[in-house]
Image (cartoon, grey):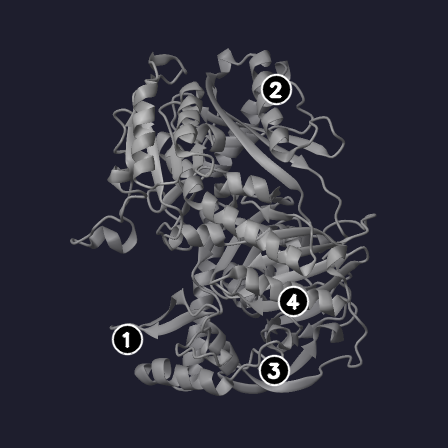
Amino acid sequence: MSLVAPSAAHGYALGIDVGGTFTDVVLAGPFGQEAVAKTLSTHNDPTEGIRTGVRRALDVAGVRPDQVTRVVHATTLATNAILENKGERVAHIGTAGFRSLLPLGRYARVEEDRFDTFFDPPAAPIPAEDCYEVVERMDSAGQVVVALDESSVRDVAERIRLRGIESVAITLLHSYANRRHEDRVGEIVREVLGPDATVVTSAEIWPEVREYERTTTTLMSAYIGPVMVKYLRNLERRLADMGVEARVQVMESGGGVMSADLAGRRAVATIESGPAAGVLAARAAGLAAGRSDVISFDMGGTTAKASVIRNGIAAITTEFHVGGKGSFGGRRAGTGVPIKTPAIDLAEVGAGGGSIAWVDHGGALRVGPNSAGSEPGPACYGNGGSDPTVTDANVVLGYLDPIGFAGGSLELRPDLSAKEIEEKVAGPMGVDLSAAANAIHQIANAAMASAVQVVTVQRGLDPRGFAVVAFGGAGPMHAARVAEPFGIDTVIVPPSCGVGSAVGLLGTDLSTDRVMTRICHENDLAAADVDAAFAELAAAGTVDLGVDIDGPSTRIEKSLDVRLAGQAHELTIRLSDDADNWNDASLEKLRVGFAEKYQEAYGIDGTGPIEVVSFRVRVTNLVEKVPLGQRATPSAVQGPSRKRAVWFQEFGEYRETPVYERDGLIGGTSVSGPLVVADSESTIVVPPTWSARVDDEFNVILTRTAQEAK
């Protein structure tokens, strides 16, 4: 997978992705990819698993730690801290009269909650006793209605100090229009609480219209910021102890990376860190295979995620929900915690290799969302796991090689898989072992297909024109079956697919996003005001990254949030890269772009008077990258290296099936299924109605036969 052309980089780069089950490490150098390591994640201290993986990769490649010049990291730390309630205790300060904004919260009844007569809404993001208010008021135009009473601020800050709370989120009414009061409140609170306290204002984090979303975004940044700072400092210290002196860069939700310092200040931007890296890897793999329209399908040990890349561009959303409920892999508005920051648009389901299969009280088989994780893991790991999982089903079906799993670092126990599935699924359901294992496999496929449906059919897209890019430790094993219901006839499995997110990290640039709400009807748009707003945002972004706005490696992307005049919700329209200044033609281009996106989003005409709601800028600093890519090493065995008994639903029985090593598939010769392709990080299952070949980029291309692809 060639993410970038060969460069003059002289050092080595590490891509580190910490998932729910495995920690993946990729080492690349001046001549391309050097080594890959896959280790079990260590949840009590994630840095321990990282150190193990880094040490293994360096040893395999024979590279000294001091030769590493770049470290890029994707982590689920922020998400887990929110979902597991392991963040810092936070006090919230708001405008007088709005103290109950967070305690009241917002929740919509969805799915089974609609029919629950004993329904209790979830706990508020923060208890009422930790919410405070200060005397002040701005109107929506940023004009002072009530002057800031600084004595009320000092009183509140002192009460917070006496309660021992060291993290504070400040969100004042309409501060997006005028941040003066909010900045002053922040200054006073810092004076009272001292230099070690975390004080976060919405003007610093995300100054955008909509009070509740702006407040929860600021709150979550204060909640997870201290956790992120401690973690990254510990990680950099432990890597330095190994001799790796490079500063850690962190993947952010929108597809770029940021410095560890910026990630600590704006931790909320890292919530979708890991999934974003995978989508970038899928984009690169699709382009390398000549497909600009692809569906990213990432199946790991805990979850599966799907996202769409159209015309080589990943879909971006400016709001998502953490911990929300919903069906078909999508999070429903009104559930969970809304976060207002750019993130790659994806759908996620609790169906991974470690997802637990269980029979409910009605005798129905369920898979997930609970996962065995890495501790103790699936039963076949032999670490004490006593629940049957999707991985156990794949072992029983013959898809997984018990000896070569996870690069040979873990030997699987098929006997334990069979025992747990027999006792907890096959027996209670009155079916044989293979039927139970196949049912688990198919239910997991159906759950993952629902995520694909969210990002295609529910977005008004016909999935038949897309190829699926499969990666993650378990993705290539399930991808063909996930593609079939949608009429998709091509699956692309890139090299190093089992550590795809870690590979994707190394093709990223430093970036940051800034937003400013300025509601303005199209008739009132003045060129000077538009240019000034973008200039202010770009200047703030370059300060975040510590770069020169006119530097040769600096790129500025501009967008506007636009809506039909009188409507409540807007669409983000990216301006063309040559839109340096607003001119007479800019408004007409904006109208046309908005009408096209409105038609695409809602299926109806979007022409009419418009108004601009917010200005957005993404500042990117292009960094020198090591060349990535992997090519086949001539194998001593051309063709299948062995056979093993594999169960396919088309046959309803086990059959001896050829197993190819990945570098045993050569040239463009197509090999008809059924077959299994093994490599060091993953396993590709090619069903009977599919064929496999290897292209010039060492992607394995799966294709359905013509009669099946109709």
Disc 3 versus disc 1: nearer the observer = 3
> Alpha carbon of mark 4 to alpha carbon of mark 1: how far?
41 Å
**Residue 650: where, in percent of width, then height?**
51, 78
Q: Can you say which quadrant of the picture contains the C terminus?
A: bottom right
Helix, strand or loop at disc 2?
helix
- Say whether residue 706 is visible: no
Q: Earlier in the sequence, mark 4 or mark 1?
A: 4
The residue carrying pointer 1 sits among few (fewer than 14), some (14 to 19) or many (20 or more) residues within 10 Å by Cα, namely few
Residue 557 spot, x, y in % from top left: 63, 31
Distance between the alpha carbons at the discs numbered 3 and 4: 16 Å
Reading the image, the residue beneath label 3 is 403
Mark 4 Cα shell of 10 Å, populated few (<14), some (14-19), many (≥20) = many
Of residues 703 and 176, the one nearer the viewer is 176
| Residue projecting furthest to the right | 8
Residue 363's label in the rendered image is 1
Q: Secondary structure at mark 1?
A: loop
In this rendering, position of residue 602 left or right of residue 127: right
Q: Amino acid at mark 1?
A: Gly
The residue singled out by tag 2 in the image is 586
Residue at 58 percent of width and 74 percent of height = 687
Graded by Cα atoms within 10 Å as few (under 14), some (14 to 19) or many (20 or more), the crowding at tag 3 reads few
Q: Looking at the rendered structure, which numbered label has been put on residue 37? A: 4
Three-letter residue code for mark 3: Ile
Sequence-wise first label, 1 or 2: 1
The residue at 32%/43% (across/down) is: 125
